[in-house]
Image (cartoon, helix red, strand yellow):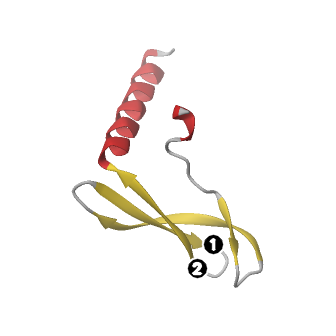
Amino acid sequence: MQQFESLRASSLYCKKCATAMPVREKLLLVLPDKEIYDYLCTGCASSLGQREVTAGELMMSRAQMARQAATSRLGF
């Protein structure tokens, strides 16, 4: 399903906090074909996981955001 192609975590289990905690994404690395993000616990700042976004996903995401911005300017 296309709706799950760019899934982002809002909370993950943190071993240090011993509970599910909200997370924030931090850009770790930009490569020609992908970007790598790290998920950090908002409670203790521990790294809880990573997410890779390919160049194709980035292009589709940016195109979708541009379409949404255009339609909101037009009042649709």
Q: Is residue 33 above or below residue 39?
A: above
Q: Residue at x 50, y 45 (%)?
A: 6
Q: Residue at x 25, y 61 (%)?
A: 31
Q: Is residue 35 above or below residue 18?
A: above
* Extreme residue in the bottom direction: 16
Q: Which residue is label 1 attached to?
A: 42
| Separation of residues labelled 1 and 2 (CA atoms) | 6 Å
As helix, strand or loop, the secondary structure at mark 2 comes to loop
Numbered badge on residue 45: 2
Q: Quadrant of residue 34?
A: bottom left
Please state the horizontal and vertical placement of residue 36, each as a whole percent of the image. 38, 63
State the residue in front, 64 or 35: 35
Q: Residue at x 36, y 38 (%)?
A: 62
Please state the horizontal and vertical placement of residue 15, each as a whole percent of the image. 70, 81
State the residue in front, 6 or 1: 1
Q: Do residues under tags 1 and 2 come within 8 Å of each other at their CB atoms? A: yes
Q: Give amino acid for label 2.
A: Ala
Q: Residue at x 39, y 23 (%)?
A: 70
Tag 1: Cα neighbours inside 10 Å, few (<14), some, or many (≥20)? some
